[in-house]
C-alpha cells in the first residue's frame, strides 16, 4: 500500500496570514481534479467575532479574490463549502452586534440578503437559503432560543429533542431542527443531514470541554457517531441505535469519519480510538493510542486535528510531555510519521480546552494540510515515500 516504505512530509505550499485565521471553522479545504489539496476559503481576523478578510483560492493555491470586511463582521461557511454568510455589524447594544446577513457563494458572488442576525452564533445551510441564529443570552438562562431566518422572514424555534436512555424521546421530532445531544444543542438542516454543534457561551473549562463536533455525521451512509461518557454510540439518521462500544478514554471531544465513511476516529484528552464501520453498520474496534505524559498538564491531543484518509491512515496533532508533534498511524497502527511541528507557543494550558491546530488529509492520503495552534498560517505537505 501507500505506506509500505518510509514516508516523509515534504512541504509543497505555505501561506502566512498576518491577521491570523479567525478560528478552527474558518478554513474550508477542497481537492482539485488532479487530487491536490488546497484551502478554498480562508477567513482571517483576530477572533471569529471580528473577521477582517475572506480569501478565496484557486486549486493551485493562488489567491483568486480577497474581500475586506467591516470591523466586527462575522462569517460562517456552510458545511459543504458552497456558501458563506456574513453578518454585518449594523447596530451594537453594548454587548453584541446585530445586522443583516449577506449570503455569498464560494466564488465571492452575492447571492441574497437575509434579515438581521444577533451576535455571532449563527449557521448557514448547504443550499445557502437558511440561517439559524442562537440568542447567546438564552444559553445563560439554560433555555436556548433559536430563530430560523430565510428570505420569507423569521421563525422562532425551540428545542425539539432530548437525548435520553440511548433513544430519541420521539423519533418524529428528528424531522425538526434543533437537538439536544448530551446537553449540547445542534442543528439538522431541512435539505441535508448536517449538524453544527455549539460550544458553551460561558468560557469552557477543562471539566466542561464543550468541543464542537463531539459527534460525526456520515452523510452517504446516513450514520451519526456520538460519543457520550465512556461509550461511542452509532445511530442511523432516524435515531435508531445500531451499535455501541466502550472507549479507552473519557472526555471525548472530536469524532471524525474518513471521506469514504469507512473509518471513524474519536479523540479524547488521553489519546485516540480507531474503528472500522462494517458493511452491516456495526463498529469494529481496530486500535487505540494512548498519550505518554499527564493529560491536562503536559500532554494532550489537539482536539480539532484528527483526520483520516480513505485507506485508514490517521493523522493527529499531539503535545506529549510539552513536545508538539504530528503523528500519522496506518490502519494497523504502524507509526508512519512522528514529527515535531513549528509555530507552537507553550505553555500547554493556553491550548486547553480550545485545542486549536487543524490537520486535514486529502481523501487519497497523498497530501496533508496543517494549521498550527497559533492559527498563523496554512502548510500543505505531500507524503513522500522514500
Image (tube, rainbow, N blue to C red):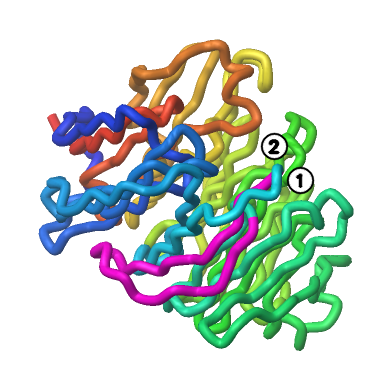
Task: Name the mark on residue 363.
Answer: none
10 Å crowding of disc 2: few (<14), some (14-19), many (20+): many
Q: Residue 151 placed where, x, y %?
A: 51, 83
Q: Can the viewer see residue 279?
A: no
> On the rendered structure, is 214 left or right of 182?
left
> On the rendered structure, is 160 left or right of 110?
right
**Local SS, label 1:** loop
> On the rendered structure, is 46 left or right of 240?
left
Question: What is the span of residues highlighted in magenta in the rendered image?
Answer: 95-118
Residue 223 falls in image quadrant: bottom right
Q: Is residue 75 above or below residue 156?
A: above
* 2 and 1 marks in contact (CB < 8 Å): yes
Q: Residue 349 placed where, x, y %?
A: 63, 18
Q: Residue 183 placed where, x, y %?
A: 81, 56
Residue 217 or 283: which is nearer the viewer? 217
Q: Is residue 20 magenta?
A: no
Residue 19 or 208: which is nearer the viewer? 19
Q: Can the viewer see residue 59?
A: yes
Q: Label 2, on which residue? A: 249
Q: Residue 178 placed where, x, y %?
A: 71, 71
* C-alpha span from label 2 to label 1: 7 Å
**Local SS, label 2:** loop
At 68% from the left and 21% from the top, the residue drawn is 296
Q: Which is the main secondary structure of the residues drawn in magenta?
A: strand
Q: Label 1, on which residue? A: 230
Residue 281 or 267: which is nearer the viewer? 267
Residue 296 or 103: which is nearer the viewer? 103
At 56% from the left and 87% from the top, the residue drawn is 152
Q: Is residue 62 above or below residue 221?
A: above
Q: Quadrant of the C terminus?
A: top left
> On the rendered structure, is 331 left or right of 161?
left
Amino acid at each position: 500500500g501507500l505506506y509500505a516504505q518510509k514516508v516523509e512530509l515534504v512541504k509543497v505550499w505555505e501561506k502566512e496570514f498576518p491577521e491570523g485565521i479567525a478560528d478552527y471553522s474558518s478554513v474550508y479545504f477542497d481537492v482539485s481534479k488532479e487530487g491536490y489539496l488546497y484551502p478554498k476559503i480562508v477567513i482571517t481576523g483576530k477572533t471569529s467575532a471580528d473577521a477582517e478578510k475572506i480569501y478565496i483560492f484557486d486549486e493551485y493555491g493562488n489567491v483568486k479574490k480577497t474581500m475586506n470586511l467591516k470591523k466586527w463582521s462575522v462569517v460562517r461557511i456552510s458545511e459543504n463549502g458552497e456558501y458563506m454568510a456574513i453578518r454585518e455589524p449594523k447596530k451594537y447594544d453594548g454587548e453584541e452586534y446585530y445586522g443583516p446577513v449577506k449570503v455569498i457563494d464560494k466564488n465571492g458572488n452575492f447571492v441574497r440578503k437575509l434579515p438581521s442576525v444577533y451576535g455571532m452564533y449563527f449557521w448557514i445551510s448547504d443550499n445557502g437559503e437558511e440561517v439559524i441564529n442562537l440568542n447567546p443570552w438564552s444559553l445563560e438562562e439554560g433555555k436556548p432560543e433559536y430563530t430560523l431566518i430565510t428570505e420569507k422572514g423569521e421563525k422562532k424555534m425551540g428545542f425539539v429533542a432530548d437525548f435520553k436512555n440511548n433513544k430519541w424521546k420521539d423519533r418524529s421530532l428528528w424531522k425538526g431542527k434543533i437537538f439536544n445531544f448530551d446537553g449540547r444543542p445542534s442543528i439538522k438542516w431541512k435539505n441535508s443531514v448536517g449538524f453544527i454543534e455549539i460550544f458553551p457561551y460561558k468560557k469552557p473549562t477543562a471539566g466542561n470541554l464543550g468541543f464542537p463536533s463531539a459527534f460525526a455525521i456520515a452523510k452517504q451512509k446516513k450514520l451519526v457517531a456520538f460519543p457520550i461518557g465512556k461509550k461511542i454510540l452509532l445511530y442511523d439518521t432516524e435515531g435508531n441505535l445500531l451499535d455501541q462500544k466502550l472507549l479507552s478514554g473519557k472526555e471525548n471531544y472530536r469524532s471524525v469519519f474518513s471521506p469514504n465513511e469507512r473509518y471513524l476516529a474519536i479523540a479524547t484528552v488521553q489519546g485516540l480510538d480507531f474503528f472500522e464501520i462494517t458493511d452491516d453498520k456495526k463498529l469494529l474496534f481496530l486500535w487505540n493510542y494512548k498519550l505518554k505524559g499527564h493529560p491536562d498538564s503536559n500532554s494532550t491531543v489537539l482536539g480539532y486535528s484528527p483526520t483520516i484518509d480513505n485507506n485508514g491512515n490517521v493523522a493527529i496533532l499531539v503535545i506529549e510531555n510539552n513536545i508538539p508533534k504530528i503523528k500519522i498511524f496506518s490502519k494497523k497502527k504502524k507509526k508512519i510519521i512522528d514529527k515535531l511541528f513549528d509555530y507552537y507557543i507553550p505553555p500547554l494550558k493556553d491550548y486547553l480546552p480550545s485545542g486549536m491546530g487543524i490537520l486535514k488529509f486529502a481523501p487519497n492520503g497523498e497530501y496533508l494540510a496543517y494549521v498550527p495552534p497559533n492559527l498563523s498560517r496554512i502548510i500543505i505537505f505531500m507524503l513522500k515515500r522514500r
